[in-house]
Image (spheres, helix red, strand yellow):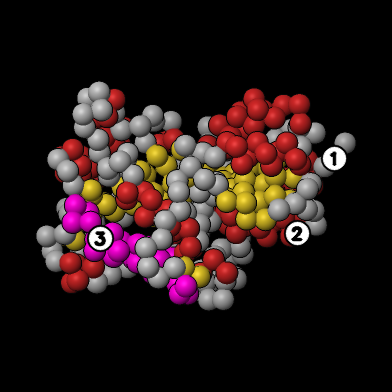
C-alpha cells in the first residue's frame, strides 16, 4: 500500500491500464502534453507516446463521436471531459448512440468507453465549473454511472470502469482531488494520514455495482456519494446519533441489497447529494427504498441536497449541503 491523493490514485489506475492493455487509449481536453488541467494524466504521454495519450479539440461532441467509432472497432477509449458542466454537447452521442448500440445491434457491437469528468462544487468555479449532473445520465439505460469519493475507491473503480464492456460515466469530485472535504471552506486538509489514502500500488479493482458501508450504526441510514460522503460523515458526528453511512460508489446499477439491508435495520434514511433536489438521483433512491422497505420505515425519508437554482458563485457555501443541514435531517428522522 502507498499513500496517494486522488489525483495520484487515478493516474496510477490509468498508467497500469495503458501498460496492461494495448487497446486502451486516452484522449481529451489537455490530457496529453499538459497532463490534464488537474494533472490526472501527468507524464502519461511521455511514457506511452502521443499515439496512445493525446489532446483533442475543445469539441465534446466530436470527442464522444470519435470514442464511439474507436469503441465499436476494438479500442477501449478513456476520454476526459475537462469539467462535467461541459459534457452536454456530447449528450446526444452518449445517450442516443453510445448507450444504445449494444441493444440496437443485438449484441454485435459494444462500446467500452470511459468518460472521466471532474464534477461538483467547492472550488468557487461558478455555474459552469461546479455542477453535478449525474442524474442526467442515470436515466439512460445502457450507461453505468460511477462517482468516486476517496483515493482508494478512485483507483479501484476507475480500473473496473475501463475494463467494463459497457460505457461508463465516471464522475470525480474535484473538491476531493487533494484532500477530503468536510463542508468547512476554511478547513482544507490533505489526504495525508487518511485511512482511504492507502492505495495498492499495483493492479487494483473494486467491482462496480457494490456500495461501501463506511460507518455502521443503528439509528439511521445515511446515503451519499462523491464529496458528500465526507460532509455526511461530519454531519453524523454533529448529530450525536449512531448511523450507517453508505457510499453508493456506483449509481447505476446501484447496490439495492446493501441499502435495503441497512434501512430494514435502522428504519430511517437520509440521502445526501449536491445536485439540485428536484429529480436528483436521491429521488430514485427514495422511491426504491419506499418500495422495498415500506414496513420497516419509522419516519419519512429525507433528502438533503443542493437548492433548485443554478449553481451560485458568491453563495456557494450556502448552496452545498453542510454538516448542520445533515445533522438536522438525521435528528428529524428520530422525531415521534
Q: Which of marks 3 and 2 is nearer the N terminus?
A: 3
The one of 158 and 229 positioned closer to us in this rendering: 158
**Seen in the image, is 318 located left or right of residue 6?**
right
Residue 67, image x and y in percent?
A: 20, 44
What stretch of residues is rendered in magenta?
A: 1-25
| Residue neighbourhood size for the residue with mark 3, other residues' Cα within 10 Å, grouped as few (<14), some (14–19), many (≥20) | few
Judge the density around disc 1: few (<14), some (14-19), many (≥20) Cα neighbours within 10 Å: few
Q: Mark 2 points at which residue?
A: 238
Q: Are discs 1 and 3 less than 8 Å apart at CB? A: no
Q: In this view, does 23 lie above or below 185?
A: above
Provide residue 99's location: percent of width, then percent of height: 31, 33
Cα–Cα gap, marks 1 and 3:
54 Å
Provide the secondary structure element on which disc 2 rests: helix
List the residue tagged with mark 3.
Answer: 20
Which residue is denoted by mark 1 in the rendering? 335
Could one spot residue 312 in this view of the protein? no
Quadrant of residue 185 within the rendered picture: bottom right
Residue 290 occupies which quadrant of the picture? top right
Dot 3: element? helix
Of the numbered discs in the image, which one, if any, rests on residue 174? Answer: none
Asked whether residue 271 appears in the rendered view, the answer is yes
Residue 5 magenta: yes
- Closer to the chain start, of discs 1 and 3, is 3
Which of the two labelled residues, at mark 1 and mark 2, occupies the earlier sequence position? 2
The residue at the point 33 percent across, 44 percent down is 164
Label 2 environment density (alpha carbons within 10 Å; few <14, some 14–19, many ≥20): some
Amino acid at each position: 500500500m502507498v499513500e496517494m491523493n486522488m489525483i495520484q490514485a487515478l493516474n496510477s489506475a490509468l498508467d497500469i491500464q495503458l501498460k496492461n492493455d494495448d487497446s486502451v487509449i486516452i484522449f481529451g481536453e489537455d490530457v496529453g502534453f499538459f497532463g490534464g488541467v488537474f494533472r490526472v494524466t501527468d507524464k502519461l504521454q511521455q511514457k506511452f507516446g502521443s499515439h496512445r495519450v493525446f489532446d483533442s479539440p475543445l469539441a465534446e461532441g466530436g470527442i464522444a463521436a470519435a470514442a464511439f467509432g474507436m469503441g465499436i472497432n476494438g479500442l477501449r477509449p478513456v476520454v476526459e471531459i475537462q469539467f462535467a458542466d461541459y459534457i452536454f454537447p456530447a449528450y446526444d452521442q452518449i445517450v442516443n448512440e453510445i448507450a444504445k448500440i449494444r441493444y440496437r445491434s443485438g449484441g454485435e457491437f459494444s462500446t467500452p468507453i470511459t468518460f472521466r469528468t471532474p464534477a461538483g462544487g467547492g472550488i468557487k468555479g461558478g455555474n459552469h465549473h461546479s455542477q453535478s449532473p449525474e442524474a442526467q445520465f442515470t436515466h439512460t439505460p445502457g450507461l453505468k454511472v460511477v462517482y468516486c469519493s476517496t483515493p482508494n475507491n478512485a483507483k479501484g473503480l476507475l480500473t473496473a470502469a475501463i475494463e467494463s464492456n459497457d460505457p461508463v460515466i465516471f464522475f470525480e469530485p474535484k473538491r476531493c482531488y487533494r484532500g477530503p472535504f468536510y463542508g468547512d471552506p476554511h478547513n482544507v486538509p490533505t489526504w495525508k494520514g487518511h485511512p482511504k489514502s492507502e492505495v495498492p500500488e499495483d493492479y487494483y479493482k473494486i467491482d462496480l455495482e457494490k456500495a461501501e458501508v463506511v460507518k455502521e450504526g443503528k439509528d439511521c441510514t445515511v446515503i451519499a456519494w462523491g464529496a458528500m460522503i465526507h460532509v455526511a460523515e461530519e454531519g453524523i458526528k454533529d448529530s450525536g446519533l449512531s448511523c450507517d453511512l453508505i457510499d453508493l460508489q456506483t449509481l447505476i446499477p446501484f447496490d439495492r441489497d446493501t441499502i435495503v439491508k441497512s434501512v430494514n435495520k435502522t428504519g430511517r434514511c437520509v440521502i445526501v447529494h449536491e445536485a439540485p433536489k428536484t429529480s436528483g438521483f436521491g429521488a430514485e433512491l427514495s422511491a426504491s427504498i419506499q418500495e422495498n422497505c415500506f414496513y420497516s420505515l419509522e419516519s419519512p425519508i429525507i433528502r438533503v441536497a443542493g437548492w433548485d437554482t443554478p449553481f451560485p458563485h458568491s453563495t456557494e457555501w450556502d448552496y452545498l449541503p453542510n454538516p448542520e443541514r445533515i445533522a438536522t435531517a438525521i435528528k428529524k428522522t428520530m422525531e415521534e
